[in-house]
Image (spheres, helix red, strand yellow):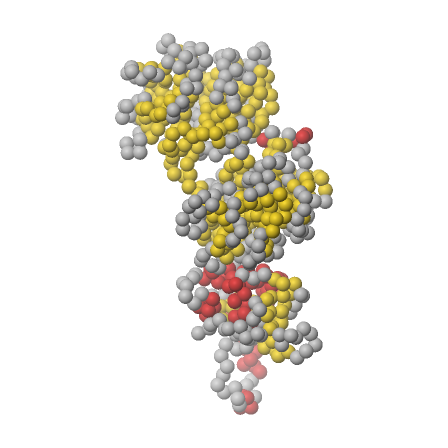
């Protein structure tokens, strides 16, 4: 049985490489190469095999003697080793399909002090046979073996070789979880090493303390990195030998495996991210500054690396990442114009920039095992990839889906996708898992969370009372699986049940004077419209019954009409009763405070956009959103219009008192994670437009997914 031998001081040379087994050093032309422990053990086993074929079973038993592992673990180690050895690896490490591996070519065993010109012992020049014949000693007996038999054997072996498919490294996916009792935060928590052999992640302990953990992908357990307490995020040096991380207002460097953190520069306290180039330059961003800064990896004073383009209405640059040349880099640009938000290309050598694609979060540069370049980016909650032509400095080919339900976390309105990629075909990312619950929270215009309202539950369609002292919201009964309406006193956050019918009740809206609440009731398979006094003492009154489902959207500011929808068509139910007015080709309508205009959504362009026109509807309309829009709402004075676009809350200054509606420029206020379920309203604006009540989904974050050779069988 094959087993790992004890270090005996042997030094081997093959090609431009020098392997010191005892000192566990691998060098190429006097340059030290870094290998994970298991990969180094694998290299020693192959080199010392003297050209013999080692079966998969032999190798796995030697590398993991006390642990059951799958073939994928060995495949991954072979892949890492080949990438380290470079272009000649496929010739040096031969694959015998479905059998094993063999190290081929000249291997010289030299004296540990030998450099050149000294004596060396040739271990192997050509592969040795699997079994040495017992009759090898008397070669003279077999001098007569016909040359023809050798030719036939050679022809047969050539035929067999041609029938075999070339070895293909298959895609492998598995998950990594933090240690027991530790959690991984959603923000900037993972970073793969450049050669994809190690993962560093932020772990939060039971006491709330944060620390970096390092996990080799060939290991089953991670190790905590001392000195990394209070960490916010981390990134790797280009050679994988060091980590840079942000902690307590400082950018620090940690040389692996056992160095002590060294301060490189001061940074604003809080969330940050960075990237490290081959030329020794670090780019980083922080929440305290809207632009990207640069600093030498040896330390120094940070200097500005990018400038906001005022003509592009840019308001923030973030998430820089260097490309392969170490001079060009990608970064995420947020603009007041949604069409200008996306992934941009910049350079240390030039002030010119180039927009690559639109995206809802930061981009990630990645390379496949074969060396092809890709840009990873977010479209909604999908992780997408697109080939990246570095020579032309542009994307090429069509984008394809890598994963759905990508984890995108937010801090002060800045989105960050939980994804990291190596430069050799390894990908790490996280996704979200719905819990079915939501929570109500107040946010300011910058996206800062101010306070929560009550405990988490299955809420939907919250509605603020006109005086903003109370809230009515639909809440699912977890046992009956039907919804009831609840009132919330916002001064003390006390919840009280408002409806008691066993039927499903939802979609509540307040009358303009706050005295009544209209809502939908699902009974006998039909959704009808009811109302009830807000004081709660009266019985519900049926306002409209018909065979169609009717969905309430809004009450007109003068209280004369209750707007509801049947399919994509809106109708206006008179407050005094009678036949509804309409139809109006609009969805989710909201009438302006002065009653002259109506904001609504329509799919006439092929996707949902926000429009404004006269009310009652007449000729002429204005398109408000340009990159998708839903859930319009007005500020109480009618001077601002809000709506949702791709998980961003947008705001537009408008003029509603003129004979002609005057729209302004739409600006993003902050990014917010919302339910994917279509709702009448997932947020409410305070009358002054300075605070927003948002119904947030409560989701749990999945473990870290590792995908090796991720470009195979994905989106193809």
Q: Is residue 515 above or below residue 231?
A: above
Quarter location, residue 116: bottom right
Q: State the residue lying farthest toward the top.
A: 576
- Name the side, left or right, on which 351 lies relative to 696: right
Camera-side residue of 314 and 566: 314
Q: Where residue 502 appears, x then y in whole percent?
A: 27, 26
Q: Where residue 472 appears, x then y in whole percent?
A: 38, 22
Note whether residue 436 is visible: yes
Quarter occupied by the N terminus: bottom left
Q: Is residue 66 above or below residue 533?
A: below
Residue at 50%, 57% in the rendered image? 216
Q: Where residue 13 appears, x then y in whole percent?
A: 62, 72
Q: Where residue 429 appears, x then y in whole percent?
A: 50, 47
Q: State the residue lying farthest toward the right.
A: 350
Tell me how many marks there are.
Answer: 0
Quarter location, residue 656: top right
Q: Is residue 617 above or below residue 393?
A: above
Note whether residue 567 is visible: no
Residue at 53%, 50% in the rendered image? 228
């Amino acid at each position: 049985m094959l087993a790992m031998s004890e270090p005996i001081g042997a030094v081997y040379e093959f090609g431009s490489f020098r392997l010191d087994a005892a000192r566990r050093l691998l060098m190429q032309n006097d340059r030290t190469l870094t290998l994970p422990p298991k990969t180094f053990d694998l290299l020693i086993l192959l080199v010392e095999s003297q050209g013999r074929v080692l079966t998969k079973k032999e190798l796995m038993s030697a590398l993991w003697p006390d642990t059951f592992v799958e073939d994928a673990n060995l495949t991954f180690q072979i892949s890492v080793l080949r990438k380290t050895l470079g272009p000649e690896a496929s010739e040096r490490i031969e694959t015998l399909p479905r059998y094993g591996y063999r190290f081929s070519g000249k291997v010289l065993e030299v004296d540990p002090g030998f450099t050149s010109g000294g004596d060396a012992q040739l271990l192997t020049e050509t592969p040795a046979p699997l079994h040495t014949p017992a009759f090898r000693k008397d070669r003279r007996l077999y001098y007569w073996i016909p040359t023809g038999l050798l030719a036939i054997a050679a022809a047969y072996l050539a035929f067999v070789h041609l029938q075999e498919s070339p070895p293909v490294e298959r895609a492998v996916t598995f998950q990594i979880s933090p240690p027991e009792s530790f959690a991984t935060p959603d923000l900037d928590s993972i970073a793969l090493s450049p050669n994809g052999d190690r993962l560093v992640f932020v772990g939060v302990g039971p006491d709330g303390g944060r620390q970096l953990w390092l996990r080799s992908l060939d290991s089953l357990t991670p190790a905590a990195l001392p000195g990394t307490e209070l960490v916010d995020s981390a990134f790797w040096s280009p050679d994988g030998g060091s980590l840079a991380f942000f902690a307590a207002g400082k950018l620090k460097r940690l040389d692996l495996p056992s160095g002590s953190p060294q301060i490189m520069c001061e940074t604003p306290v809080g969330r940050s991210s960075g990237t490290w180039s081959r030329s020794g330059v670090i780019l980083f961003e922080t929440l305290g500054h809207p632009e990207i800064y640069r600093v030498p990896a040896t330390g120094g004073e940070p200097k500005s690396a990018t400038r906001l383009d005022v003509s592009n209405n840019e308001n923030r640059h973030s998430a820089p990442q260097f490309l392969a040349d170490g001079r060009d880099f990608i970064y995420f640009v947020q603009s007041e114009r949604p069409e200008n938000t996306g992934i941009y290309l910049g350079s240390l050598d030039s002030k010119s920039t180039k927009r690559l694609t639109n995206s809802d979060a930061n981009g990630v540069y990645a390379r496949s095992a074969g060396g092809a370049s890709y840009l990873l980016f977010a479209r909604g909650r999908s992780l997408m990839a697109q080939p990246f032509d570095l020579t032309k400095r542009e994307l090429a080919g069509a984008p394809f889906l890598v994963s759905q339900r990508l984890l995108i976390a937010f801090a002060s309105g800045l989105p960050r996708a939980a994804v990291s990629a190596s430069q050799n075909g390894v990908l790490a990312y996280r996704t979200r898992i719905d819990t079915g619950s939501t929570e109500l929270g107040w946010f300011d215009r910058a996206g800062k969370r101010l306070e929560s309202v009550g405990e988490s539950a299955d809420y939907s369609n919250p509605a603020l009372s006109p005086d903003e002292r109370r809230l009515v919201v639909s809440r699912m009964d977890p046992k009956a699986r039907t919804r009831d309406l609840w009132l919330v006193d916002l001064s003390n956050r006390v919840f009280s049940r408002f409806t008691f019918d066993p039927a499903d009740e939802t979609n509540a809206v307040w009358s303009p004077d706050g005295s009544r609440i209209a809502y939908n009731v699902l009974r006998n398979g039909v959704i009808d419209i009811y109302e009830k006094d807000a004081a709660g003492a009266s019985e519900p009154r049926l306002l409209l019954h018909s065979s169609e489902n009717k969905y309430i959207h809004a009450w007109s500011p003068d209280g004369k009409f209750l707007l509801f929808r049947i399919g994509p068509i809106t109708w206006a139910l008179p407050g005094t009763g009678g036949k509804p007015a309409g139809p109006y080709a609009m969805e989710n309508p909201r009438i302006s405070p002065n009653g002259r205009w109506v904001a609504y959504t329509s799919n006439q362009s092929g996707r949902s956009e926000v429009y404004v026109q006269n009310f009652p509807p007449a000729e002429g309309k204005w398109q408000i959103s340009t990159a998708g829009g839903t859930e319009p709402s007005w500020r109480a004075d009618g001077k601002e219009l809000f709506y949702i676009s791709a998980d961003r809350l947008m705001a537009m200054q408008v003029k509603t008192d003129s004979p002609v509606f005057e729209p302004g420029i739409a600006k993003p206020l902050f990014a917010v994670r919302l339910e994917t379920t279509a709702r009448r309203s997932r947020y409410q604006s305070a009358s002054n437009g300075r605070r927003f009540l948002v119904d947030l989904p409560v989701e749990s974050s999945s473990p870290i997914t590792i995908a090796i050779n991720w470009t195979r069988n994905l989106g193809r």
